[in-house]
Image (cartoon, helix red, strand yellow):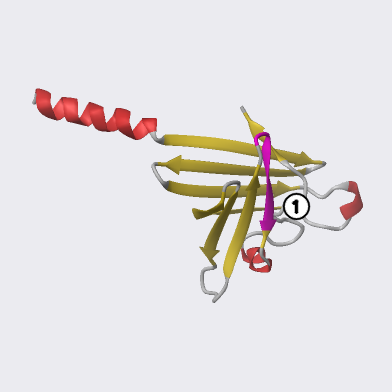
Amino acid sequence: MKKSLFLAAALMVSGSVFASTDHYVLRDGNHVQHLKITTVNNEINVSSDVDFEPNSNETGKEPCSGEVSGEAKSVAANELVMKKHSEGEASFCELKVHLSPTGAKIEQSEDCRNFAAGICRFSSDGKELVKVK
């Protein structure tokens, strides 16, 4: 019994040593973007969600929200790529995340419109989401 308890405790401690989560946020007027990057051992998961209320220059537009998440691959020292298959479609949403010490910038493929419609988008349009400490 003691051996099992010790083994379970050792697994919990060893797993948490190799786990980290980073959060990034951008508020641009009434547009809010959130990015979460979770790394457990060598597996990287990216989750991005957006909540957009129309800004003053977007009159007549509807509020929207969207979310996409999936496993990402590190393609360079400061770049991650996440691809998510669109349900019922032959397309993939691809997010390219460019990391810096203070934040992240996101680029999206055209097929990400299946996950965020209307004025919503995952792309940060060159603006940096600030890393939350």
Measuring 26% from the left and 33% from the top, which residue is drawn there? 11
Measuring 50% from the left and 55% from the top, which residue is drawn there? 73
Q: Could you say where residue 74 lies in the image, as x and y percent from the top left?
A: 52, 52
Position of 90 relative to 75 (above/below): below
Q: Residue furthest front?
A: 77
Position of 63 relative to 28 (above/below): below
Q: Could you say where residue 21 lies in the image, as x and y percent from the top left?
A: 51, 36
The quadrant where residue 116 appears: bottom right
Left-right relation of 39 to 51: left
Measuring 73% from the left and 42% from the top, which residue is drawn there? 128
Q: Could you say where residue 16 lies in the image, as x and y percent from the top left?
A: 37, 31
In this orientation, which residue lies closer to the viewer: 82 or 85?
82
* Number of disc labels: 1
In this orientation, which residue lies closer to the viewer: 65 or 121?
121
Name the residue type under label 1: Pro
> Which region shows up in magenta?
101-107
Left-right relation of 53 to 103: right
Q: Residue furthest bottom?
A: 90
Report the predominant secondary structure element of the magenta stretch. strand
Q: Residue furthest top?
A: 2
In this orientation, which residue lies closer to the viewer: 93 or 78?
78
Q: Is 106 contained in the magenta span? A: yes
SS assignment at label 1: loop
Q: Is 85 contained in the magenta span? A: no
Determine which residue is flagged by label 1.
63
Q: In which quarter of the image is the C terminus?
A: top right
Q: Could you say where residue 89 lies in the image, as x and y percent from the top left?
A: 55, 75
Q: In which quarter of the image is the N terminus?
A: top left
